[in-house]
Amino acid sequence: MVRNFRTDWVDGEIGRFEFITPHIVHEGAVRENTALDVFPRRTCWEGDKTHGFKEVAFIDGATEESYRKTSRLINRMRYQQEDGTPARTIREQAEGEGAKLLDAIERKAAQILTTHEFSPTGTFEGHPETSHGQQAVTVPEARVADAIAVCQAHRKVACDLRENPILDEAPEATVNISIDEVGVKRQKVQRTGHEEADPEGRSVSSSQKRKYVHNTVIHIEKNEKRDLSTGHGLHHGLSLLIAFLLQRDLVQYRFQFFTEGSTVLPEAIRRCFSWYKNLGILLEWYHLEENCQWQLSLAMKGRMRRNEARNELLPLLWDGLVDHAIAFVKRIDASQLKNPDALTQLIGYVERNRAHIPCYAVSKELGLRNSSQIGEKMNDRVVAARPKHHGMSGSVSGSIALASLTALTRNHEYAMWFEEGNIEFKLAAYV
């Protein structure tokens, strides 16, 4: 038995410990090496980690604060200020754990997809005539009629709210899905400290050449239970979403997607879910209201005129009366405008999203969702809270890894992952 040259170490919640591993030599040949045959294979400077350490370092630490603060917290708890775990090590450990988690998710998703006649990337490969998605279950007509009557009783303009063709889905037969892409400043590989020039010889400021890391965050809700999923890019996130819906047998319900009004997301949803008929795409009221106010501010002369136009336009959109809203914008006197192009953009925005604008008033009266505020909040907690709110930037691998670990925490699956290296793809009742 011969002592190995390299010393191994373990990071635990009560301290960082080094230990010696031997190898057995018989007749000049190594018969067994405990560092390789008994313990998991590690890189040169990688140690093992206890489950308790992972919870403190990753779940309570790196996903909430910077690596430097996490390092100070851990070493102060363990009374190891001099020989403790450095911040760089925690960063490498967190990114490594997140990369392993994402790899496990992708492998499980690929297995689920191929089992259900999909490619590993989420493309349906079954027969084109295969029927997926039952007919939408809607709120009973009597309830809808009562809600319309209540809403129309408070309207100054005599408009028929039945003009809006978007159906009112039954919440008990609907899966609500919010998708958003969150951009985080990308970390520079090297800081030169000098200005760069564009092809025409003009200097380019750091703000102009700033690049971002985009994480797709998907929030799924069904009967007060929810799940968070993250992916690198929209198509990757949608393929993981399809795998989750198949695994949880949610393809028997209606998929109600909530978007912010861009053309890219609805097109991607229709393309990836072309195999599924029972789905709807709704424009969130918050984004519709915000964009209308912004374009009116750019277009109108003076705050008073802008507010008057806003107070006329938003109730029409709230009632889902798209034609009336567009007609009102076109009637605005040119003498009140400072930028007519802004109104043209507003009309184009509303027209592009015509099919996604429901009667928000009736939906609210029926208790249906008009926005994905909880999805926005989860986006903030999963991706934006740590880097954006603290002025930090991140690498591609680091940002995705931390987002995966944060989603693991919100889904209450970190204990199983740390102990068994497995995830369940389940809906969890969290806040």
Image (spheres, helix red, strand yellow):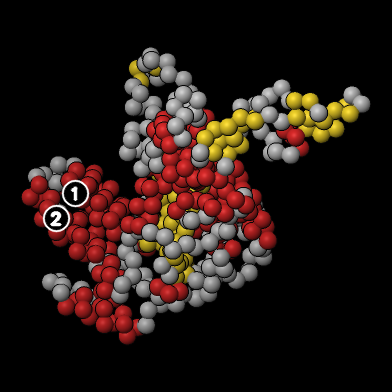
Q: Residue furthest right?
A: 27
Q: Among all residues in the image, which is located at the extreme left? A: 304
Q: Secondary structure at mark 2?
A: helix
Q: Toward the viewer: 221 or 51?
A: 51
106 left or right, relative to 91: right
> From the image, which quarter does the C terminus lie in?
bottom left
Q: How many marks?
A: 2
Q: Amino acid at mark 1?
A: Leu
Residue lying at 52% horizontally and 35% vertically, measured from the top left? 15
Q: Nearer the viewer, residue 38 or 337?
A: 38
Q: Quadrant of the N terminus?
A: top right
Q: Amino acid at mark 2?
A: Ala
**Mark 1 sits on what residue?**
296
Q: What label does residue 397 carry, if any?
A: none
- Residue 7 in picture, x, y percent from top left: 66, 26
Q: Quadrant of residue 256?
A: bottom left
The residues bearing labels 2 and 1 have C-alpha atoms spaced at a distance of 8 Å
Label for residue 309?
2
Instruction: Bin the neighbour count of mark 1 within 10 Å (Cα to Cα): few under 14, some 14-19, many 20 and up.
Output: many
Query: Is residue 63 among the parts visible in the rendering?
Result: no
